[in-house]
Image: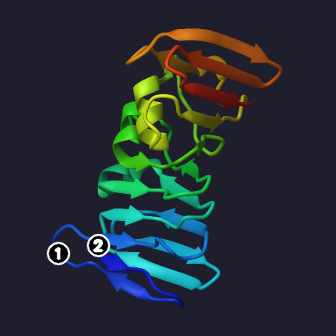
Amino acid sequence: TILAGTGSDTINGGAGTDSLDYTGQTAITSATFSGIGSVSITNTGGTDTISNIEDFTLSGGADTISINTQNFADYNSIDGGAGSDHVNVTGNTLTAENLEGTNFASLFTDVEELDFTGSDLTGADTFDIGDTDIGSITGSGLGGSLTIYVNTGTIALTDINVLNQSGSVTGDSTVGSTRTVDWDNGTQLIIQG
């Protein structure tokens, strides 16, 4: 495990599986995951250029992360750490990369917001996500709350297909451009258009 320091650094994990830890650093204003050979993380201390790191723990602040849909397989884990963390999803459509809630749950933990406004679903495809997925993504287990932002011109509120994984949906309502889904175990999903 490599501990991130202050200032701008170039970090290369080399061969094998490596971890980079930003715990204790200031909130990350920009973390761009463009592939195993190209990660850039910026906070008030500077900008780090990173390659060959597979596991990340981000700061205890409100971090902003961007990841290309084509690069999910390049990383083992991205932990948002404490704070309210936001993931911008860019690149190919969610459909083209066959990404669902389980893929996000396998990669992310301690993340409270997913932003799909820079992505799309094509054809009759839906994005499937359930209460167990949400518990893994948020790191809070069952009873966590996740917000997904969509551009309703490309992803309708109803294109997010909710699953009963550990619990059962007890409420699914839409008011204006906000859809709220609740499960009987306290898990909540808010889809904001």
Which residue is at the front of the view, 140 or 4? 140
Query: Taking 35 as reference, is 163 above or below it?
Result: above
Element at badge 1?
Answer: loop
Determine the secondary structure under disc 2.
loop
| Residue 179 sits in quarter | top right
At 53% from the left edge and 25% from the top edge, which residue is drawn? Answer: 187
What type is the residue that disc 2 sits on? Asn
Question: What distance separates the C-alpha of mark 2 from that of mark 1?
Answer: 7 Å
Give residue 66's quadrant in the image: bottom right
Q: Where in the figure is residue 132, as x and y percent of width and height?
A: 40, 27
Which label number is shown at residue 63? none
Q: Which numbered disc covers residue 52?
A: 2
Location of mark 1 (residue): 15
Q: Amino acid at mark 1?
A: Ala
- x%, y% of residue 170? 58, 8
Question: Which residue occupies 32% across, 62% down?
Answer: 55
Q: Nearer the viewer, residue 191 or 186?
A: 186
One can see residue 161 in this view: yes
Q: Earlier in the sequence, mark 2 or mark 1?
A: 1
Tag 2 and tag 1, C-beta contact below 8 Å = yes
Identity of the residue drawn at 43% across and 35% down: 141
